[in-house]
């Protein structure tokens, strides 16, 4: 795993811009603590920071090939992992390519030389990369199918700036961060952003499953992958068998590394299944025991309050699963002070407004994990793939013509002042986002009304909550130089399960039936049948009170970028109430974006234009 930056400008000679490229590159130092490299050409420049995972001695970047008698450079900067790189290497060798290293980086470069930008269709992995092709006189940017690895770009009058994180682009004087009022709805609820959208003017994210080509005519983006709907012909037993077979292959592939590996283990179905398969795989090769990690808050036994998304504490189940699976388990115990002290670090990692203590606790867990391992496997995306969230199973919520995870929760955009609400019409904005995504759902002719609707509900979750979870996972892990792999994001699994009818996905009358049946022989009954429980929240009353007080203080702070944008009465009413929603732990949880947006705008000296 790594971080990279780049600059393309057809109007100037970038070979004189080493200092600026160095500044851009070093914004990625946390993502790549092991090595550093830059390359500058006449119109293109690439910088890379490396976290060495495969072929630690080789694979330095940017990696270059030289073509033809003129030795025209083709230069690659890449972050991520190509899990099928060994098969691709064999195929490319048969086509006449020779290799100097054992790295997947060189396989990616050679794949590009053989197949051009179409190489992405052959990759199984999580990746983002940039290739400067001086033969074609173009830059190619690409991102994995589900968007596990980030890649941002900012078109310029005669080229483009790009980076693994926004900070890499912001470090170039050619880009000036600005913010318009139109961005407020997605700033206050990032899950409303459609793929590719960011709140900053002129800053885009390469959409998952897309390629962006930049040449002298400008930027051109196109998809190389989309979900395809078709009739599912396998019976239930065959479907469960195929899911298990896929998961075993996926986990085996994602354990390939030349550094220590671990898993996150909450004691829920998703992380426990990944941990069980990983532990089995390592034991077969005499590489065990597997290390596993979970989060626990000091005092949570007294402070915990059950909600629809978090009905139980993780700690007892994590301990039970670890004992059953024989892992070397570590509880990362945090007190309120440690979490609050980590919030500024997690904010820097985010670049964009974050999730407060949710980000900070994940940052601390990954920092503890990084002391023992460089690669970890996580259970993200199982809920979106198999249908695990409470909103998938509440009939009233499912059939409501809006994003299911939003439900009847208060909207922070409704706390904007009356003039802004009138101008922005946040309810219409949310409805437009909903309609835009709904129009993209691929249906199957003749499928039942329920199956058609559940396709939509699953599609929404893949493009809203999952995108936000993957972004947080990447930022918090890479901020401490840790690579987190996500087996449930393998596109082969998603393509298969996507077409399984809802009746099979709920075959045992519960959420994630297919996954539960596929893992039936791996886990203790208590873990196998445990209800869905989201990432742990910190329930400390003093911390929640501090969030409320700080948000209310913004209303009377003339230096706050939000002070003039908010309806003070509505904010006070919200802060003084006890909103119970399907996704939020408490009213304080609901208010966090106000605090985060305010801090982010101050940090970057942003105001609403």
Image: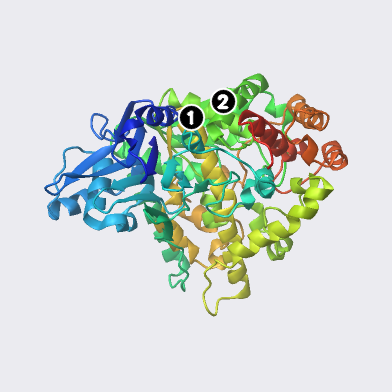
- Answer above or below: position of 354 versus 416: above
Q: Which mark is residue 169?
A: none
Q: How many marks?
A: 2
> Which of the pair 25/401 is nearer the observer?
25
Q: Residue furthest front?
A: 11
> Which of the pair 75/435 is nearer the observer?
75
Assess whether mark 1 and mark 2 are in contact (beta carbons under 8 angstroms): yes
> Which of the pair 572/442 is nearer the observer?
572
- Answer above or below: position of 578 versus 235: above
Residue 89: x percent and y percent?
21, 48
Q: Residue at x 39, y 37 (%)?
A: 4
Instruction: Give the left or right position of residue 604, taking residue 107 as reference.
Output: right
Q: Callout 2: few (<14), some (14-19), or many (20+) C-alpha neighbours within 10 Å? A: some
Residue 38: x percent and y percent?
31, 32
Circle 1: element type: loop
Q: Residue at x 62, y 49 (%)?
A: 191
Q: Which residue position holds label 1? A: 479
Tell me the distance, in whole angstroms, between the alpha carbons under discs 2 and 1: 8 Å
Q: Residue furthest bottom?
A: 446
> Which of the pair 95/71 is nearer the observer?
71
Point out the image quarter for the N terminus.
top left
Residue 173: x percent and y percent?
48, 33
Q: Earlier in the sequence, mark 2 or mark 1?
A: 2
Q: Quadrant of residue 392?
A: bottom right
Q: Which residue position holds label 2? A: 345
Q: How is the image coloured?
A: rainbow
Instruction: Give the left or right position of residue 204, taking residue 371 as reference.
Output: right
Point out the image quarter for the C terminus.
top right
Q: Is residue 244 visible?
A: no
Q: Quadrant of residue 600?
A: top right
Circle 2: element type: helix
């Amino acid at each position: 795993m790594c971080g990279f930056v780049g600059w393309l400008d057809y109007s100037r000679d970038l070979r004189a811009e080493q200092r600026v490229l160095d500044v851009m590159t070093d914004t990625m130092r946390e993502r790549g603590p092991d090595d550093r490299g830059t390359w500058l050409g006449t119109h293109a420049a690439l910088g890379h920071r490396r976290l060495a995972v495969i072929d630690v001695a080789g694979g330095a970047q940017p990696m270059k090939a030289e073509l033809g008698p003129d030795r025209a450079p083709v230069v690659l900067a890449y972050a991520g992992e190509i899990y099928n790189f060994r098969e691709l290497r064999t195929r490319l060798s048969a086509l006449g390519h020779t290799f100097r290293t054992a790295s997947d980086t060189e396989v990616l470069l050679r794949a590009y030389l053989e197949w051009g930008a179409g190489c992405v269709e052959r990759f199984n992995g999580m990746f983002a990369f940039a290739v400067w092709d001086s033969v074609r006189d173009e830059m190619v940017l690409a991102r994995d199918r589900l968007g596990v690895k980030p890649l941002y770009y900012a078109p310029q009058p005669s080229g483009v700036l790009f980076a693994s994180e926004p900070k890499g682009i912001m470090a170039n004087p050619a880009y000036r961060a600005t913010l318009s009022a139109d961005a407020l709805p997605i700033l206050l609820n990032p899950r409303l952003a459609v793929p590719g959208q960011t709140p900053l003017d002129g800053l885009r994210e390469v959409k998952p499953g897309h390629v962006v080509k930049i040449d002298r005519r400008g930027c051109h983006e196109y998809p190389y992958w989309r979900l395809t709907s078709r009739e599912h012909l396998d019976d239930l037993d065959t479907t469960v068998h195929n899911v298990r077979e896929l998961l075993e292959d996926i986990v085996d592939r994602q354990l390939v590394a030349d550094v220590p590996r671990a898993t996150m283990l909450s004691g829920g179905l998703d992380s426990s299944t990944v941990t069980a398969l990983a532990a089995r795989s390592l034991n077969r090769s005499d590489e065990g025991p597997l290390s596993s990690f979970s989060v626990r808050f000091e005092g949570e036994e007294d402070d915990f309050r059950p909600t629809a998304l978090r009905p139980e504490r993780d700690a007892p189940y994590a301990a039970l699963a670890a004992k059953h699976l024989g892992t070397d388990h570590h509880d990362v115990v945090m007190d309120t002070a440690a979490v609050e002290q980590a919030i500024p670090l997690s904010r820097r990692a985010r670049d964009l407004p974050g999730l407060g203590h949710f980000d900070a606790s994940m940052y601390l867990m990954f920092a503890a994990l990084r002391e023992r391992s460089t690669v970890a496997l996580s259970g993200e995306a199982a809920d979106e793939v198999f249908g695990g969230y409470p909103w998938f199973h509440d009939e009233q919520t499912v059939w409501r013509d809006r994003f299911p995870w939003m439900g009847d929760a208060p909207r922070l955009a409704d706390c904007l002042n009356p003039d802004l609400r009138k101008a922005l019409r946040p309810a219409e904005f949310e409805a437009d986002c909903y309609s835009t995504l709904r129009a993209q759902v691929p249906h199957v002719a003749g499928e039942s009304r329920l199956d058609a609707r559940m396709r939509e509900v699953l599609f929404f979750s893949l493009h809203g909550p999952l995108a936000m979870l993957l972004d947080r996972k990447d930022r918090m892990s890479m901020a401490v130089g840790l690579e987190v792999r996500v087996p449930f994001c393998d596109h082969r699994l998603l393509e298969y399960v996507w077409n399984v009818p809802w009746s099979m996905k709920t075959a045992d009358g519960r959420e994630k039936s297919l996954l539960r049946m596929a893992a039936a022989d791996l886990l203790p009954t208590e873990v196998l049948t445990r209800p869905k429980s989201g990432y742990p929240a910190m329930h400390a009353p003093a911390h929640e009170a501090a969030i409320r007080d700080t948000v209310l203080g913004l209303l009377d702070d003339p230096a706050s970028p939000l002070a003039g944008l908010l309806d003070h009465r509505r904010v006070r009413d919200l802060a003084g109430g006890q909103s119970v929603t399907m996704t939020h732990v408490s009213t304080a949880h609901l208010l966090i974006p106000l605090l985060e947006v305010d801090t982010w705008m101050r940090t970057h000296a942003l105001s609403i234009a």
